[in-house]
Image (cartoon, coloured by chain):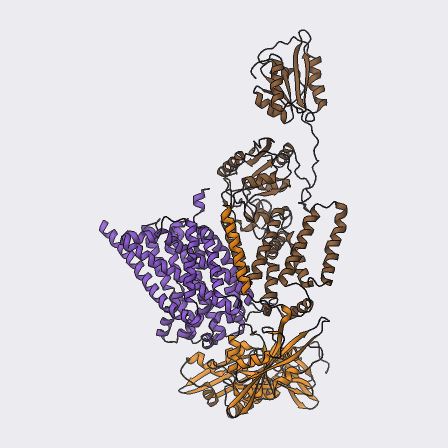
Chain colours: A orange, B purple, C brown
């Protein structure tokens, strides 16, 4: 019995030593924690492209202040960028805590597949980071110093996340959403488009993609309608203004239903939008909530206005963008079958799209001031 | 209280041993292969593929009536004679060794990719087998109890992506059953392989306490396994879409990461921990069965020595299978052969028993 | 006794008791006419001298008017006639007489008579019944067992007046001849387990005084396991609850801790107060306890793994303070945690033996000053100290002292596993613990088993009036303990 015990103890000690000798230990302070990643591209010559990936890395001080600096890696492929970046860093990179990734315009126009491949392979990266396309170079935006934030990536992450609830933005701008929408049948990617205006980072619209290449950017007004037609259960403000001093605004939540019909080879899509909400401010109708006629008039006028805006956008989409950025192809594929080799972008742009908008006022607020 | 009776398996232990012997590593990669063949109808293949284990359970019910106290090794020797029976039993043994080894390598792969990049795979594999050898020395009843406990603590990981139901839409799963029937059938073949492990049933029915309810319990275990598999494939396709599900190696993991828990940045940690426990359990199951077979073949060797002595064999087997690309191909081929072997083997046994009964009359 | 010769018998008895022991022999005469010599033998200090003088010597020496001659049945006659005591018996065997004198009886030997009268004048100084120090309850009885076996048995008898409550006496120890009482309720207990327990106790062959803790270790199956296979308690209410579930209580002379056998794992997480409080409250507290057990073993190892191997899993809001506090710390995370744990163990172990006056000062010193200065001198980081401190407090949620120490000790191997192998190590650790628990049995009863019928009292505590059956985990012969009495006053409502 004794011998067996000694044997076990010695075996355990040996195993322990073998195992611990093999492991590398990095202590926490030597990790460079990345807070934001940028993707840029520079066309050196018509055939050669250079990838520039700036990383925004946290600096920690004992005093409690948090700041960050940019480390840039350049190279002809992703692997090279990793090594050139490390030559200026005194810490090991730790991904997984990043809040945003910002993609430069040039890169986006060339196709997002390299990023997606890298993100999908790397086990450390966080799938919940928010993404945005920026005008110009991502390095500048990532390197901006914003008061009160350790790094601009924190600000941008909050910026994108908090857009939901206004302008009908949704939250589907994370890595996982990108992965799911590119290359899936009938689906399409849009990303927020940010820029620096008067020293502040702002969302200026949406970037529209065809497959994984960016083809157009919109302004905020178009983005609003695009979101309204594309997403379900989003919130925003609509206003009907008759004269500069007479207007009524309503804050709505949308419900979107799509129906798809096919006659021979022609497709018809019907988008039903039901917008319900409460009045945000009202200087136009005196008795909007007590007078049924006023309420109905307002609802009708508002619906018509939105419908006109939508149809305007649809024309633009069919003629200018030539992409199915409303993900209507998905509905058709679900109903009529997948994997038939159909190019949904073409079909949707050649099909008939009808929009039915209904605005309903169902909450009233505290009281009416204008009587 | 009969102490000997205490060592038999209760009904719930039977249910969870059966469940545990089938649902293991395959569950993470299953959606990928199902989506690749049957596309958005992949989840149906899980239901259809359960024909294979149902058939085996059926035959086992028949054996349970005829030979209530013998496990399959004894039966095969009775039917085929000692020498041929022993050879066939040995082939069965290699099947279980293969199963253990492939589970261990798959698991090591996954965990090294996601969490433990720093540990060399042979250490992980060696540790897995040592722990499972230790478990096997404690006997079947212990394995039963551990199966029950682990099932209840880990079942949440399979159902955790319920949150994904909200943000995805049914569009991904439609149109339903419009795909080629041939595709669905092919997908079912693949899913069928992930039910292997059901052969454990042939070894444990002598040890069950309540023989009448045994078949019912095993059907229950199978039923739970079918539900879990179907759900996993369904949610992966539902959330990711069939096109994306086939691109990722382990789509289910991608889905679980969409679940956000506030304290841990990533649900992955909790998932990996609980899932490691599941893997241990399933390897212990299979290890134990291999040991039972070994013991039958080498009747004279001491129980415990056998357990620990078999560890090097398993480690060798796993290391040969290591390497993601090669192992995938070898595994597919071998699994095909083995499943065919088992089907024929068991069917012939049943037929012979039937014929012998006919002769007696 | 062989002959009636007084001197011979006295010598035999004194030989049996030990020549140099404190035996008192008082010779006296019985009767007036032809005085019959007799002797009183007892051990000094074990019998009350007042009672001997007043109720034995006085009547026998003074009040015997008739002539007494040695004859058959004299001892019995005298006991019935002249001795004013209630607890008397007649004994013939020298060995039995010696044994009983050792236990405090008084023997009256009469010249020429083969029998002797044994009287119980036992009086000794014992600790009064007070609340047990280690197991106190807010809402429960305040009495506890003491060192005297008779009193302990009486405490149990007062609480369970069932005629089926049986007590069997055994003796163990060559030199100490310690009394051990095995108490059980006859029609509930499982006879096989009872036989097993008695077999093991009688098989013990050691020298010296056996305390209940030692007895525990002698009779248990798995010596090297971390987990105790018998439960000890100082509280009578816990002991009586065990009896009614079909368990066996072993009381040892000289120890206030009684042993319960057999036990199952979940029992160690049940406290008396659980049953004295309301259902929802008790269930919540019980869940808290189970969470506590899990935390004690896993919290530090998980913290270690996160810091060392998987830093990407810590949310950014925690990350910043942790990194900031860790800049400039001298030790690696593993050594930090181990060092802090060892310091805490020192404090705990040392604090047990402190005189109470120093205890308060020292706890102040230990807790606050050492902790604070350790942080300031950058040996440990505040987060580590927090984690270790929380673990310590949480340990004491587990009601049973043995179990809480076992669980504490489990932490160290778990830490080592986590240090070497990361989360895989923690998984290995938990799996081995599970397997080990599942394979343990306490006197043949499986240690770690969950029966569906017992779920009302395992992780939560269901309503008291619903617990109609005894727990299935312990084998018993009489499953029903309550009936549905609520319907008597609530009609059909539940």
Residue C135, located in which quarter of the rendered image?
A: top right
Residue C38, located in which quarter of the rendered image?
A: top right
Q: Residue C447: x percent and y percent?
A: 52, 47
Say whether residue C270 is left or right of residue B85. Answer: right
Q: Residue B163: x percent and y percent?
A: 54, 69
Which residue is located at x 46 percent, y 42 percent? B1
> Is residue B266 visible in the rendered structure shown here?
yes
Q: Residue C202: x percent and y percent?
A: 53, 33
Q: Residue B231: x percent and y percent?
A: 46, 67
Q: Nearer the viewer, residue C112 or A29?
A: A29
Which residue is located at x 50 percent, y 70 percent? B113
Which residue is located at x 35 percent, y 74 percent? B182
Residue C152 versus residue C397 in the image, above or below: above
Say whether residue C82 is left or right of residue A255. Answer: right
Q: Nearer the viewer, residue B48 or B31?
A: B31
Residue C128, located in which quarter of the rendered image?
A: top right
> Is residue C77 visible in the rendered structure shown here?
no
Say whether residue C318 is left or right of residue B121. Answer: right
Residue C217 versus residue B206 in the image, above or below: above
Q: Count the labels in the image.
A: 0
Q: Residue furthest top?
A: C33
Residue A126 versus residue C242 in the image, above or below: below
Q: Nearer the viewer, residue A2 or C478?
A: A2
């Amino acid at each position: 019995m004794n011998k067996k015990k000694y044997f076990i103890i010695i075996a355990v000690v040996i195993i322990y030593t073998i195992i611990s000798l093999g492991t590398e230990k990095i202590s926490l302070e030597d990790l460079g924690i990345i807070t934001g990643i940028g993707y840029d591209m520079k066309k050196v010559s018509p055939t050669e492209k250079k990838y520039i990936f700036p990383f925004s890395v946290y600096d920690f001080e004992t005093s409690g202040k948090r700041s960050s600096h940019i480390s840039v890696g350049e190279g002809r492929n992703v692997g090279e960028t990793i090594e050139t970046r490390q030559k200026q860093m005194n810490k090991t990179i730790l991904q997984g805590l990043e809040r945003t990734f910002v993609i430069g315009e040039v890169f986006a126009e060339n196709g997002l597949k390299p990023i997606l491949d890298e993100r999908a392979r790397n086990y450390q990266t966080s799938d919940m980071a928010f993404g945005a396309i920026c005008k110009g170079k991502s390095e500048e935006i990532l390197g901006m110093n914003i008061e009160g934030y350790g790094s601009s990536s924190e600000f941008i992450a909050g910026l994108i996340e908090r857009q939901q609830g206004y302008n009908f933005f949704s939250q589907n701008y994370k890595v996982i959403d990108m992965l799911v929408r590119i290359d899936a049948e009938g689906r399409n990617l849009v990303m927020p488009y940010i820029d620096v205006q008067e020293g502040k980072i702002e969302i200026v619209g949406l970037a529209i993609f065809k497959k994984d290449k960016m083809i157009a950017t919109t302004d905020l007004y178009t983005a609003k309608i695009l979101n309204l037609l594309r997403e379900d259960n989003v919130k925003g403000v609509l206003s009907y203004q008759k004269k500069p001093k007479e207007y009524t605004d309503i804050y709505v939540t949308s419900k979107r239903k799509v129906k798809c019909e096919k006659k021979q080879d022609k497709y018809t899509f019907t988008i039903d939008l039901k917008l319900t909400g409460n009045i945000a401010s009202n200087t136009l109708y005196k008795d909007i909530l007590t007078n049924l006629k006023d309420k109905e008039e307002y609802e009708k006028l508002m619906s018509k206005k939105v419908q006109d805006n939508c149809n305007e956008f649809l024309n633009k989409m069919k003629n200018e963008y030539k992409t199915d950025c409303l993900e209507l192809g998905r509905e058709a594929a679900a109903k009529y079958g997948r994997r038939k080799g159909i190019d949904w972008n073409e079909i949707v742009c050649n099909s008939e799209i009808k929009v039915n908008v209904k605005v309903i006022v169902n909450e009233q607020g505290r009281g009416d001031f204008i009587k | 209280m009969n102490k000997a009776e205490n060592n038999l398996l209760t009904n719930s232990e039977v249910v969870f041993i059966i469940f545990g012997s089938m649902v293991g590593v395959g569950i993470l990669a299953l959606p990928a292969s199902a989506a690749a063949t049957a596309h958005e109808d992949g989840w149906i293949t899980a239901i259809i593929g359960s024909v294979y284990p149902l058939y085996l359970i059926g035959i086992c019910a028949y054996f349970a009536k005829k030979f209530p106290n013998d496990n399959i090794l004894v039966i095969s020797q009775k039917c085929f004679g000692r020498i041929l029976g022993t050879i066939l039993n040995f082939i069965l043994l290699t099947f279980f060794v293969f199963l253990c080894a492939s589970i261990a390598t798959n698991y090591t792969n996954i965990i090294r990719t996601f969490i433990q990049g720093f540990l060399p795979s042979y250490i992980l594999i060696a540790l897995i087998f040592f722990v499972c050898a230790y478990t096997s020395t404690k006997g079947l009843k212990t394995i039963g109890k551990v199966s029950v406990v682990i099932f209840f603590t880990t079942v949440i990981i399979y159902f955790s992506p319920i949150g994904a139901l909200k943000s995805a839409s049914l569009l991904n799963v439609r149109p339903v059953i419009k795909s080629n029937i041939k595709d669905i059938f092919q997908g079912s073949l693949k899913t069928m392989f992930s039910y292997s492990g059901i052969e454990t049933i042939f070894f444990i029915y002598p040890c069950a306490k309540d023989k009448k309810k045994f078949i019912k319990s095993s059907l229950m275990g199978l039923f739970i396994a079918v539900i879990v598999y179907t759900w996993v494939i369904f949610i992966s396709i539902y959330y990711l879409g069939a096109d994306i599900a086939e691109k990722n190696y382990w789509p289910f993991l991608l889905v679980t990461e969409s679940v956000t828990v506030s304290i841990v940045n990533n649900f992955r940690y909790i998932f990996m921990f609980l899932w490691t426990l599941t893997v241990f359990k399933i390897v212990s199951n299979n290890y134990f069965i291999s040991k039972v077979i070994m013991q039958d073949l080498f009747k004279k060797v001491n129980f415990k020595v056998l357990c620990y002595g078999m560890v090097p064999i398993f480690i060798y087997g796993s290391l040969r299978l290591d390497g993601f690309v090669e192992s995938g191909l070898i595994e597919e081929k071998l699994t095909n052969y083995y499943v065919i072997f088992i089907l024929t083997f068991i069917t012939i046994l049943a037929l012979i028993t039937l014929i012998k009964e006919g002769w007696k009359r | 006794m062989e002959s009636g010769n007084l001197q011979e018998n006295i010598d035999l008895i004194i030989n049996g008791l030990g020549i140099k022991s404190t035996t008192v022999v008082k010779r006296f005469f019985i009767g007036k006419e032809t005085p019959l010599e007799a002797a009183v033998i007892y051990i000094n200090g074990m019998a009350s001298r007042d009672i001997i003088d007043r109720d034995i010597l006085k009547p026998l020496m003074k009040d015997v008017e008739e002539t007494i001659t040695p004859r058959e049945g004299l001892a019995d006659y005298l006991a019935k006639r002249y001795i004013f005591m209630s607890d008397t018996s007649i004994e013939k065997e020298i060995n039995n007489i010696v044994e009983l004198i050792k236990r405090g009886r008084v023997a009256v030997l009469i010249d020429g008579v083969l029998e002797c009268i044994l009287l119980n004048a036992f009086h000794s100084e014992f600790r009064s019944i007070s609340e047990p120090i280690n197991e106190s309850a807010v809402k429960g009885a305040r009495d506890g067992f003491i060192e005297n076996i008779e009193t302990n048995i009486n405490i149990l008898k007062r609480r369970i007046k069932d005629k089926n409550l049986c007590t069997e006496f055994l003796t163990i120890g060559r030199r100490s001849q310690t009394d051990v009482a095995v108490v059980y309720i006859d029609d509930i207990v499982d006879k096989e387990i009872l036989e097993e327990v008695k077999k093991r106790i009688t098989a013990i062959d050691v020298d010296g005084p056996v305390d209940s803790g030692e007895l525990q270790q002698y009779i248990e199956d798995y010596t090297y396991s971390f987990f105790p296979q018998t439960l000890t308690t100082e509280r009578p209410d816990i002991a009586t609850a065990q009896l009614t579930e079909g368990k066996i209580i072993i009381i040892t002379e000289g120890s206030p801790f009684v042993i319960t056998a057999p036990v199952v794992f979940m029992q160690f997480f049940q406290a008396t107060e659980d049953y004295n409080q309301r259902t929802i409250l008790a269930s919540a507290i019980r869940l808290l306890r189970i969470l506590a057990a899990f935390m004690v073993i896993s919290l530090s190892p998980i913290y270690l793994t996160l810091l060392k191997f998987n830093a990407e899993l810590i949310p950014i809001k925690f990350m910043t303070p942790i990194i900031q506090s860790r800049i400039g710390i001298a030790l690696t995370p593993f050594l930090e945690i181990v060092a802090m744990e060892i310091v805490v163990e020192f404090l705990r172990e040392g604090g047990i033996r402190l005189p109470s006056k120093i205890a308060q000062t020292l706890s102040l010193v230990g807790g606050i000053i050492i902790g604070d200065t350790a942080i300031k001198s950058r040996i440990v980081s505040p987060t580590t100290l927090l984690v270790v401190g929380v673990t310590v407090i949480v340990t004491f949620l587990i009601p049973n002292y043995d179990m809480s120490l076992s669980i504490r000790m489990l932490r160290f191997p778990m830490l080592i596993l986590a240090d070497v192998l990361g989360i895989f190590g923690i998984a290995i650790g938990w799996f081995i613990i599970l397997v080990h628990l599942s394979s343990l049995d306490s006197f043949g009863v499986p240690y770690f088993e969950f029966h569906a019928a017992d779920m009302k009292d395992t992780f939560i505590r269901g309503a008291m009036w619903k617990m109609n059956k005894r727990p299935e985990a312990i084998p018993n012969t009489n499953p029903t303990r309550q009936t549905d009495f609520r319907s008597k006053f609530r009609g059909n409502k539940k």
